[in-house]
Amino acid sequence: EAGVTQSPTHLIKTRGQQATLRCSPISGHTSVYWYQQALGLGLQFLLWYDEGEERNRGNFPPRFSGRQFPNYSSELNVNALELEDSALYLCASKGRGKETQYFGPGTRLLVL
Amino acid sequence: AQSVTQLDSQVPVFEEAPVELRCNYSSSVSVYLFWYVQYPNQGLQLLLKYLSGSTLVKGINGFEAEFNKSQTSFHLRKPSVHISDTAEYFCAVTSSMGGRRALTFGSGTRLQVQP
C-alpha cells in the first residue's frame, strides 16, 4: 500500500510569489491535514480537510489556503510569500472513523 | 485545548544503553497520544499510539510507552538503543472528543546515540 505522497520535494520562491503544494493521501483515507515545521517554531497545525470540506484551520493568516479534490488529494496554496514562510510543509492523511494520522515526506519551501 | 511538553531537547546516550524520552501533556478532555520519529530530511513516521485499553503500548523498532493518566505523561522507552535510532522524536496529542482532531505536538527530543 502506497503511503502519503507530496510534491514537489523542494520549492524555491521569491518573496511576494505564490506557492502551490500537493498531497495525495493513502488510498481510502478521506481526511488530509497540513502542518508547518519551521525552524525554531516546531510543528504547527495549518489546515484540515475532510470529505472535500475545510473543517478547521490553525492560527495562520488567510493567505494560507487550500482545497481538497473529489479524489481526496489536496492542495495547499500560500500567497504573498514572506521569508518566514520558509519551512517544511507536511501533509498527513487519516481514514474515516480512524484516529491515526500518517505523514508524507514533506515539501521543503524556501523563500528568498 | 491541549499542550505537550517534552522537557528534554536533546538526549545523548551510548549504543546498547536504555533510554527514556519524557512527554507530559495537558488537556481538559480525554486524549489520544502518539509518538512519531523524524529522521533527517524526512517526514514523520508513527512509532506507537495510545487510544484506549492497556496503558503499556508497544511500537515499532522495539519502542514502548506507558500512558499515565494521573501524571498526564506518556514517556517513551527503549531497553537498548542502536546507532540507527538517532533521530528527532515528537510526542503528540489530540482530543478524543471530536472537534478539530488536529495533532498538537511537543517541541521534540533529539536522540543522539553514540558508539
Image (cartoon, coloured by chain):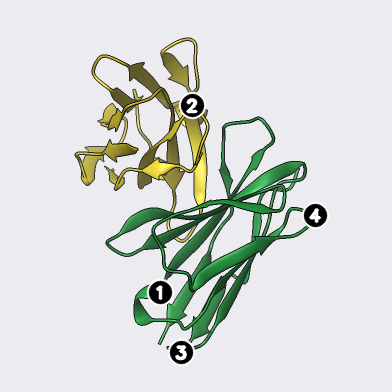
As shown in the figure, which amino acid type bears the numbered disc 3? Thr
Chain the render paints yellow: B
Q: Quadrant of residue A23?
A: bottom right
Q: Rounded to the nearest whole Å, what is the CA distance between mark 4 and mark 3?
A: 31 Å
The local secondary structure at tag 4 comes to loop
In the figure, the shade used to draw chain A is: green
* Chain for disc number 1: A
- Residue indicated by mark 3: A14
Q: Residue B92: x, y in percent?
A: 40, 38
As shown in the figure, which amino acid type bears the numbered disc 1? Ser
Q: Residue B44: x, y in percent?
A: 49, 48
Q: Residue A94: x, y in percent?
A: 63, 41
**Residue A35 relative to residue B82: left or right:** right
Residue extending farthest to the top is B54
Q: Rounded to the nearest whole Å, what is the CA distance between mark 3 and mark 1?
A: 10 Å
In this picture, is B74 found above or below B37?
above
Task: Write the residue at 46% across / 89% down.
Answer: A14
Q: Residue A91: x, y in percent?
A: 57, 55
- Residue indicated by mark 1: A86
